[in-house]
Image (tube, grey):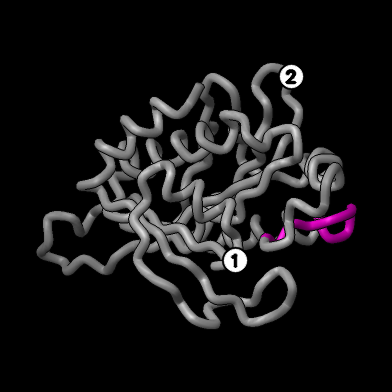
Amino acid sequence: MKIEDVVLQGQYVRLEPLDLRHVDGLVAASAVDRSLYQWSPVPQGDIETTRYVETALAWKEAGSALPFAILRKEDGIIIGSTRFWNIEFWPWPPDHRLVDRTTPDVCEIGYTWLTRSAIRTGANTESKLLMLMHAFDVWETRRVCFHTDVRNVRSRAALERIGCQFEGILRSHRMAADFTPRDSARYSILASEWPRVKQRLKGLVV
């Protein structure tokens, strides 16, 4: 099932549907400090970044992802990227009241990275708030998941800070950025937890 494009805009950032026109800005953003991406698959250079965007758009066409470029609102400069992915539509039975549902039942937020100047600003927190508001308040999803390399202490701390619940470690879950089998730390937010997390996130966006 196709997912409709949407622009998500806050006080500090604007999330635009990712497109090939964003390639140059993404290349510039990721080149500032490559050491930031030890645990994340962040593309470098024109060729890698073009392939990265094309893959995200193919997933979007297949209905399994909705990727964004993250722009700083004040000047429109691209500062990173993120996406909804692993989007699932549950097979509700024909006689169920949700059989005509057209929005995702569950999804994951991932492939999130920022340029150096956006680290330790409100950009990441506000991006998560905007996406979670869309997932829970518009799509009315039941769960949003996050996975990160168990070695990525900064990412794990950020997820715990916003109120995500740690579910456990998935062993050799995915290929890591260093091309080794990656153990992933799994976090999630349920619809029943969202009101509390939403208030917490709003308080963190400064």
Q: In which quarter of the image is residue 56?
A: bottom right
Q: How crowded is mark 2: few (under 14 residues within 10 Å), some or many (20 or more)?
A: few
What is the x, y in percent for residue 154?
58, 51
Of badges 1 and 2, the one in the foreground is 1
Q: Which residue is drawn at 55% across and 82% down?
A: 172
Q: Mark 1 points at which residue?
A: 151
- Residue displayed at 73% across by 61% down: 38
Give the magenta-colored segment's residue range. Answer: 40-49
- Could you say which disc has been placed on residue 173 in the image? none
Examine the image and state in which quarter residue 57 appears.
Answer: bottom right
Foreground residue among 203 and 127: 203
Percent across and percent down for residue 108 are: 45, 57
Q: In this view, does 143 lie above or below 179?
A: above
Q: Where is residue 165 in the image (x, y as percent from the top left)?
A: 34, 55
Q: State the image coordinates of residue 34 (x, y, percent, origin top left).
A: 82, 52
Q: Is residue 33 magenta?
A: no
Picture mark count: 2
Q: From the viewer's perspective, is residue 200 above or below residue 182?
A: above
Quadrant that contains the N terminus: bottom left
Q: Is residue 118 above or below residue 64?
A: above
- The answer to if 48 sits in the magenta stretch is yes
Residue reaching furthest to the right: 46
Number of the label disc, if any, that sits on residue 75: 2
Instruction: Tell me: residue 109, above or below residue 70.
Output: below
Compute the Cα span from label 1 to label 2: 34 Å
Q: In this view, does 122 lie to the left or right of 51?
A: left
Task: Name the residue at 51% across, 21% down.
Answer: 206
Of the residues under marks 1 and 2, which one precedes in the sequence? 2
The residue located at (25%, 48%) in the rendering is 191
